[in-house]
Image: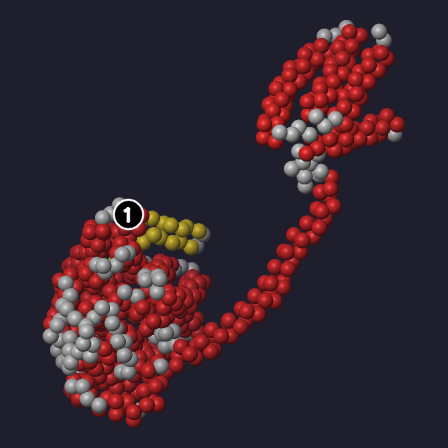
Amino acid sequence: MFGYGWLVLISPLLGFLSLSCFGKRIPRSIAGYVACATVGLSFFISLILLVHLSVLEPENRVGGVQAMYTWIDSGQFQLDFAILIDPLSVFMFLIVTGVGFFIHVYSLGYMEHDPEFKRFFAYLNLFIFSMCVLVSAADFFFLIVGWALVGLASYLLIGFWRDKPSAVLAARKAFVMNVIGDVGMLIAAFMILETFGSLSYQKVFESAPGMFLANDINVILITLFLLVGAFAKSAQLPLHTWLPDAMEGPTPVSALIHAATMVTAGVYLVARCHTLFELAPFTMYVIATVGIITATFAGTIAMVQTDIKRVIAYSTMSQLGYMFLAVGLGMFSFGMFHLMTHAFFKALLFLGAGSVIHSMNDEQDIRKMGGLAKAMPITYITFLIGSLALAGFPLTSGFFSKEAIIMASYHSAMGNIAFWALAIFTAGMTAFYSFRLFFTVFQGDSRTPDAHPHESPITMTGPLMILAFFALTAGVLGHWVDGFLSPVFGGHAEHYEDGFLETIAVLVGFGGILTAGLLYMVPSDRVAQLREVLAPIHDILFHKYYVDEIYDFLIVKPVKAISVFLEDMGEKKGVDFAVDQVGVQVREVSKYVSIWQSGRIRDYALNMVAGMALVLIFVAFL
Amino acid sequence: MGQEFILLVSATIFCIGAFGFMVRKNPLIMFMSVELMLNSVNFLLIGYSHILKSLDGQVFALMIMAVAAAEVVVGLAIILTIFRTRHDLNVDHLDSLKG
């Protein structure tokens, strides 16, 4: 019924293959359009799928597994080459290909002068394909395949500028961190196979409720291992250190992978496996707790960072924390709704930041920017919209999705006052740091007099405007998202109304914006004074709570020491010595044997005749 | 002619050939020594062919002559090439295959 859904995957795959195999024969002018067209086609087909699903009866919308053929059939175990088309996967398709399409178009402008333009687009297409594999997988096997593929695409794109050592290091760090998550996923998959005898979502989710009581140790272990993968991919504590470093990649990559799509895979995973997670309230509690702690943690760091992309990166971590809080509370559709609005406004912010960086000749330090409002009016207004949405300003998209989560953090069955207090505190910080960034970059006077900022070309401002439109208005889709996804989650998420708490949340948001305005709108020495007073806290925050240093001390250094020791004792004095001795001893013996091989033909003849004579004597006399 | 005569002559020629091959340093002479050894065998074959009234031995002898001729062609070509490149035909100096 949904057989054409395969095209969503095949189209960007063909784009990637053609750009990477025949890249030299495709003219540079066409390559970018090819990449955009393949993703555009995917987006178009996703829209058709959306319409197709919408006209079906709600109970017919789930379970649309499209198997191409049986790939592995081994005794009890069977694995189909299949994709799953249901509201959740189509929802993710739309975000991935939709936002992905605009970012592709944006990259046409942003990467225009890069010598390796085609390689960039090949990687982008690979990423879109991988992400589609991840969200359309119908079993845990292809989930892991997609999971690893997006990790690969992310690695390639972070390290895209491969002659920049910091980018290569960041790429390696991201890869290692993600592999930790992959290992967790693998263990979870093996446990699922052991327990259920199948990897298919359908079978696992059907039989799970009958097999386990709530908080059964097996289901807790499975979900916790799945969570390791989810946390690594979504940069939650304590596996978050790669995300800020990943900002070394080109800015469209940060927008596409490290804000809008890949990092939300963890949230998607929890939502997809909600049947399992609901059986393990303990794990749900862990998710919500880690989520809200990460949100607060990242929010505090974002307030003092000075690199424009790092501020947005920490805010991404913080918003992902909100999503995990939502799914941890069992409010899956709120999590997915925030995922969607976040994809719009965070992609918008990153692309806006890219536009700023582009016009400032690759300057990323916000202390050197300022007064850009006049030079780049479109970027200015769209960035303002993005910041408002991020801050949760009333009636923007971020307001609706964040309010729903904050309300749920207090009123839902698992909610409590601590979750709510941290959520509201983080909301205030979010408003503060997003407007600190906004005011510093766009208001006041230019701090770099010799810079000549200019507005970006239409390929860059066009996507900005479209994303700004969605960032502003996507809030009205809340009920639709809930209704559309309800067949997957088996019910609607309850929307709590509480005028008092909502007023507090709005006021806190205003307070954050106001504080930022007072401190940064007009240049003054108030900031410096404040920094003086809060110096110890500022230092801790500026150094990101020293997590990198702690990891370095606890893990990297000991591992290095062990490796050095093993290299010396095991490698050089053990294996190498033995192998070397074999060679040395053979050579010693050969010295004596090779005397016989004199190279002179007459010696050989003599030896031959002597040998023959000996044989004759032997035959004749003995 | 008896068997003893044939065997003696053949063995003598063979020993002369083998001795020549071992003591001479000129490859051409060494070739002639090889020919001597081959022909001592031919002599033996033909002699026994006569005694045993069978033509098998003569067929073998013809075969050996053909092979020897072919061998000489190849060998002389090699010797010529060596002479052209090294201007020296002392076989004791050709020891670059020494182990």
Residue A192 visible to the viewer: no
Residue A374: x %, y % from top left: 11, 75
In the depicted structure, whether residue A531 falls above or below residue A18? below
Which chain is indicated by disc 1? Answer: A
Residue A501: x %, y % from top left: 19, 87
In depth, the one of A398 and B72 nearer the eye is: B72
Residue tagged 1: A24
Residue at the limit of the structure toward the front, as seen here = B87
Residue A364: x %, y % from top left: 26, 73
Give the quarter of the figure containing the C terminus of chain B.
top right
Direction from residue A523 to residue B30 in the image, left or right: right
In the depicted structure, whether residue A9 falls above or below residue A285? above
Give the quarter of the figure containing the N terminus of chain B.
top right
Q: Residue at x 23, y 77 (%)?
A: A368
Residue at the limit of the structure toward the right, as seen here = A621
Residue A445 position by quadrant = bottom left
Residue A415 position by quadrant = bottom left
Q: Residue at x 12, y 72 (%)?
A: A375
In depth, the one of B45 and A588 nearer the eye is: A588
Residue A307 visible to the viewer: yes
Number of marks in the image?
Answer: 1
Direction from residue A288 to residue A395 in the image, left or right: left
Secondary structure of residue under mark 1? loop
Residue at the limit of the structure toward the bottom, as seen here = A533
Q: Residue at x 86, y 25 (%)?
A: A620
Direction from residue A22 to residue A401 in the image, left or right: left
Identified by mark 1, the residue type is: Lys
Direction from residue A466 to residue A287 in the image, left or right: right
Residue A209 position by quadrant = bottom left
In depth, the one of A388 and A281 nearer the eye is: A388
